[in-house]
Amino acid sequence: MTDLTVTKPTAADEQPTSIPASIRGDFPLRGNGFSRWVGRVGLRLLGGWQVIGDLPQVRKGIFPVAPHTSNWDFFIGVFGMLALGLNLSYLGKHTIFRFPVNGMLRWLGGIPVDRRAAHGVVGEMVEQFQQREHLILALSPEGTRTKVTEWKKGFLHMAKAAQVPVIPVALDFSRKVIEITPAYMVTGDIDSELAKVKAKLAHAVGKNPQHA
């Protein structure tokens, strides 16, 4: 089986100076030796996936993960999260957070959102970032497994309004690698920032490339 490479967080003084001091600190972690072992075993059973790159020393941020072309992406992401011991969150429609799966979804980092809310999902998440001491949000900018011509821009609006960094993550089936790229702050116009994220992840090949 392929060895799993899990890199450790880099030192805080190695982080980009553009990241505000107010959100610097230890990357939020969770789990124990057993959960990390489960994650490593899961990645190996799925073909020997590796995790490469450095975790930024930040308490808050957004992980846009791409490409998203298969249901397998979710399982690879969960096993990767467990293997690294990361405390990640994700968004889910509020109606699915019900018994008997409510507890499990929340334990896995699920945040229920009501898309009908007056201030919208972006406004709701900006409030979450402001209220929480730690919050790393992982999401798919494509929003679906099927082919799309445009990525959703909501995550960039969130990052800019909440003043948290974006940490693009490539899910590359051609190399069986989850690649964590350097964190950076959203400072320009949203269209140019989206092009920047796409460029950082363009090399990654999805399980079903025809859907990318």
Image: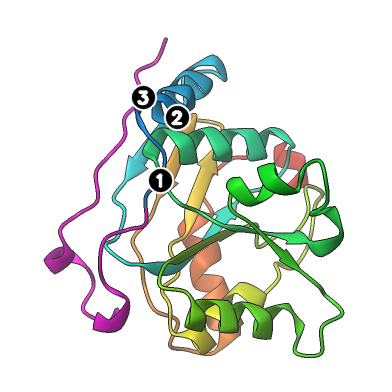
Q: Helix, strand, or loop for circle 3?
A: loop
Q: State if disc 1 and disc 2 touch (CB < 8 Å).
A: yes
Where is mark 3, residue-wise? 4
Q: In terms of depth relative to the viewer, which is nearer, 18 or 127?
A: 127
Q: Residues within 10 Å of mark 3 (few under 14, many from 20)?
A: some
Q: Amino acid at mark 3?
A: Leu
Q: Quadrant of the N terminus?
A: top left
Q: Amino acid at mark 1?
A: Arg
Q: How is the image coloured?
A: rainbow
Q: Helix, strand, or loop for circle 2?
A: helix
Q: Position of residue 6 (x, y in %)?
A: 31, 35
**Residue 11 seen by the camera:** yes
Where is mark 2, residue-wise? 35
Residue 145 is labelled as none
Task: Kindly indicate the quadrant of the structure image that contains residue 195.
Answer: bottom right
Q: Position of residue 69 (x, y in %)?
A: 72, 43
For marks 3 and 2, the one nearer the N-term is 3
Q: Tell me the residue at 51%/77% (across/down).
A: 129
Where is mark 1, residue-wise? 30
Look at the picture and state if 195 lies above or below 31. below
Q: State if disc 2 and disc 3 touch (CB < 8 Å).
A: no
Q: Residues within 10 Å of mark 1 (few under 14, many from 20)?
A: few
Q: Tell me the residue at 57%/20% (across/down).
A: 46
Q: How many marks?
A: 3
Q: Helix, strand, or loop for circle 1?
A: loop
Q: Position of residue 22 (x, y in %)?
A: 29, 82
**Residue 20 seen by the camera:** no
What range is drawn magenta here?
1-28
